[in-house]
Image (cartoon, rainbow, N blue to C red):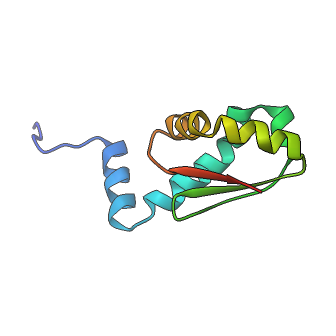
Amino acid sequence: MRRNNAEQIGQLIRNYLRQESLESPLNERRLIGAWEEVVGAMVASYTRDLYIRNQTLYVSLSSAALRQELMMGRELLVRNLNRHVGAQVITNIVFR
């Protein structure tokens, strides 16, 4: 007996998360978790706090020189973080 309306389990889970409005918070956690992998351990060691609000990633840094350097490459960093997660999670980064 063959079923024609079979769906893949991954698609069913994505549909459920989207329906229950859990997809965005999950992607936000993934993005924050990927910060060290995307920017590297050295940059991550100067990071004190990360959080996302209204599609903006807020990053607290302990180095003013690093803050200036990251501000110049902000657009590339946004693209790399979103690509790593596989979704459009953030549109901007604010360095503090």
The answer to which quarter of the image holds residue 96 is bottom right
Q: In this view, does 22 lie above or below 82?
A: below
Q: Is residue 15 above or below residue 10?
A: below
The answer to which quarter of the image holds residue 51 is bottom right
Nearer to me, 31 or 62: 62
Nearer to me, 72 or 58: 72
Residue sitting at 52 percent across and 61 percent down? Answer: 25
Q: Where is residue 2 in the image (x, y as percent from the top left)?
A: 11, 36
Nearer to me, 77 or 50: 77
Q: How many marks?
A: 0
Nearer to me, 67 or 88: 67
Instruction: Please indicate whether residue 56 sits to the left or right of residue 34 in the image.
Output: left
Instruction: Please indicate whether residue 40 sits to the left or right of residue 90 in the image.
Output: right
Q: Position of residue 36 (x, y in %)?
A: 74, 38
Residue sitting at 46 percent across and 38 percent down? Answer: 86
Q: Is residue 89 visible?
A: yes
Residue sitting at 77 percent across and 36 percent down? Answer: 69
Q: Where is residue 52 in the image (x, y as percent from the top left)?
A: 61, 60
Residue farthest to the bottom, as pictured? 20
Q: Position of residue 94 (x, y in %)?
A: 67, 54
Instruction: Please indicate whether residue 76 sits to the left or right of residue 40 in the image.
Output: left
Which quarter of the rendering shows the N terminus?
top left
Q: Can residue 46 be seen in this view?
A: no
Instruction: Please indicate whether residue 54 sits to the left or right of residue 20 in the image.
Output: right
Q: Is residue 22 above or below residue 44?
A: below
